[in-house]
Structures are given as C-alpha cells and as structure tokens.
Image (cartoon, coloured by chain):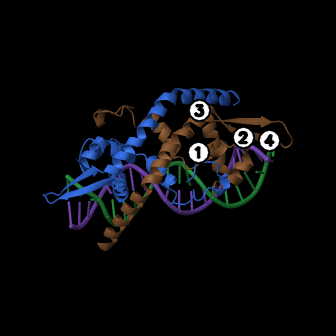
Chain colours: A blue, B brown, C green, D purple
DNA sequence: CCGGATCCACCAGGATACTG
DNA sequence: CAGTATCCTGGTGGATCCGG
C-alpha cells in the first residue's frame, strides 16, 4: 500500500486481504496477539502458563490466537512427548521484529494520551450540554 | 504501559480502557479510522465525498467512525450554513502525527509480508497434509 | 496437560427509510 | 446534503464437555 500522493480512489486493495498494511494492522488490532508475543519475549512458555498469565483471555481464544500467530510465523509450537504432553510456544525472530515496531507506537500513545482524553472530555461536555 | 522487564502478571491495566497503548491500538485496529485520516491529509472533505472515496464503507459506519475520531480530537467537523448544509471534515495536528506513526509500520509490513505469506503457505501445506 | 467440538448469547455492521 | 433510527443477520467470543 502506497502512502504517497496516490489519489485515494486508486489505492489498490485496501479491501483485499492481500494488502500488507491491512494484514499487519489486523494482526496488531487483535486484542491479545501483541500481548501474547510480548509475554513470549520472556522465554518459551506453556499453554496453561499463558492462560494464567494473560488474565482474562478465554481458553478458546488463546488457542485460536496462538494458532493464528503460528500460521503467520510469528511464533513456533514445540511438542514434547511427556505424559501428559508438554507444549511450548516460542516467539520467532520475525515476531521479535514486530514487537520492536510497537515501541514507537507505545511512545506516541503515552505522549498524546493526555490530548486524547482532554479532547474526549471536551466533546462529551459539549454533546451532553446540547442534550 | 511499561515495555521493559516487568513481570507480565503485573502489567497494570491492559484490560482497562485507560491503558494508552490499548486505546491507540484499538483506534488503529479500526478498519476505517486510519484510512479516513489518510484521506483527510489531502485536505478538508465533505461527508458524501468521503463516502464515495472510501469504497465499501457504509453510510452508518462512516458516520460512527467520524464521530469517534472527532471525539478523540483526531479530526474536526466544520458546518457551513448553506442550503443544503455543507459539512467539512479536517484532520487535526494530532491526527497528522498519528498518521506519521503509521509509516514505519507500513514499511515493516511491506518488508515482511513475504515472510508471513510464506509461513502461511508452509503452515497450510502441513495442516492439510495431515488432514 | 493440551486442545478440539459444540451450543449459545451478544452486538458490530449492512440495508433501508426517514428528518432537518 | 448530512445525518439518525430501525430492523435484521452473521460472525466473534464465552462456557462447557469430550478426546488424545
């Protein structure tokens, strides 16, 4: 997806799953994906450990999210033939670089959160004044 | 939200709407929000013009998204008392800085999209081989 | 211990019609 | 032109049970 002076009605395929930017945004958009990857930066972790650490995520969604991230090559799944079976998840190099991309964004968020909250207060005050 | 060696069960409030990072991610996650802001970088634009340019967005969702972005102070709404009424939307300075944050991300996406697609192919090949 | 399969509740979003 | 209101549906996620 080009970010320069391309007429906006000609942006190629923002509606397509093929649009790289859209894909990455969707991945980041995922409520748990990034959190999971950040958690894995600390080292290989097992399923139930993740389930305990990432408070609030359901069994099902954890499973789904892990599979999606594995499919994208952002983490790997390692099975050990113990009894009962042991499964470890590890972030990949690709996943680590994606995590690295988050820092500027976090920085922006922390810097401007005040502006946003202030704008929201103003907006709410105005709208409820007219209500 | 700290990104350093904080034990993950102590990350303060990822589940709270107050978490700046979560808030910004949610905004970026929005399928149309960023696209809309990028469109507005070209200059003030009217409602129906946006509706035409941003193909695929519904009337309702465009309205909702604009209102949300206005509430966050990322764009402003200007009403002109013509007949019929004219309304222009303009991106704010805050909105522009957020747009600026997207470029590294887009760059990452374009750089690594090949890796991701390859990983997906591998994964799909393996899983359907076992099916 | 690690999940998959199933059932269900909820709501974001599309289509449409209506106001100022 | 610029929205708001209403109805409706499809998909997401929670809860639970079951199998490897």
Query: Are tags 1 and 3 found on a single chain?
Result: yes
- Residue reaching furthest to the left: A83
Sequence-wise first label, 1 or 2:
1
| Residue with the mark numbered 1 | B33
Work out how far the residue at label 1 is from the one at label 3, CA to CA, in angstroms. Answer: 14 Å
Element marked by disc 1: helix
- Residue reaching furthest to the right: B83
Examine the image and state in which quarter residue A68 appears: bottom left
Residue at (30%, 42%) from the top-left corner?
A: A39
Residue in front for this viewpoint, A86 or B49: B49
Q: Give me the disc on residue A91.
A: none
Work out how far the residue at label 2 is from the one at label 4, CA to CA, in angstroms. Answer: 12 Å
Examine the image and state in which quarter residue A15 appears: bottom right
Query: Are tags 3 and 2 found on a single chain?
Result: yes
Please identify, in this view, whether the residue under mark 2 or under mark 4 is nearer the observer: 2
Residue in front for this viewpoint, A9 or C12: A9
| Residue with the mark numbered 4 | B86
Query: Is the C terminus of chain B in the top left, top right, bottom left or bottom right quadrant?
Result: bottom left
Sequence-wise first label, 2 or 4:
2
| Residue with the mark numbered 2 | B44
Please identify, in this view, whether the residue under mark 1 or under mark 3 is nearer the observer: 3
Q: Is residue B8 left or right of residue B65?
A: left
Please identify, in this view, whether the residue under mark 1 or under mark 2 is nearer the observer: 2
| Residue with the mark numbered 3 | B94
Residue A28 location (% of width, % of height): 44, 47
Element marked by disc 4: strand
Sequence-wise first label, 3 or 2:
2
How many callouts does the rendering have? 4
Residue at (41%, 61%) from the top-left corner?
A: B117
Residue C3 location (% of width, % of height): 29, 59
């Amino acid at each position: 997806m080009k970010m320069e002076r391309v007429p906006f009605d000609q942006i190629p395929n923002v509606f397509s799953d093929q649009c790289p930017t859209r894909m990455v945004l969707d991945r980041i958009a995922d409520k748990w994906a990034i959190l999971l990857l950040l958690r894995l930066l600390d080292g290989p972790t097992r399923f139930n450990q993740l389930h305990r650490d990432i408070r609030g995520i359901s069994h099902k969604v954890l499973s789904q999210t892990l599979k999606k991230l594995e499919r994208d090559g952002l983490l790997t799944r390692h099975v050990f033939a113990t009894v009962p079976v042991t499964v470890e998840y590890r972030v990949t190099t690709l996943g680590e670089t994606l995590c690295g991309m988050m820092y500027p964004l976090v920085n922006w968020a922390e810097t401007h959160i005040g502006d946003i909250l202030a704008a929201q207060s103003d907006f709410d005050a105005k709208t409820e004044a007219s209500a």
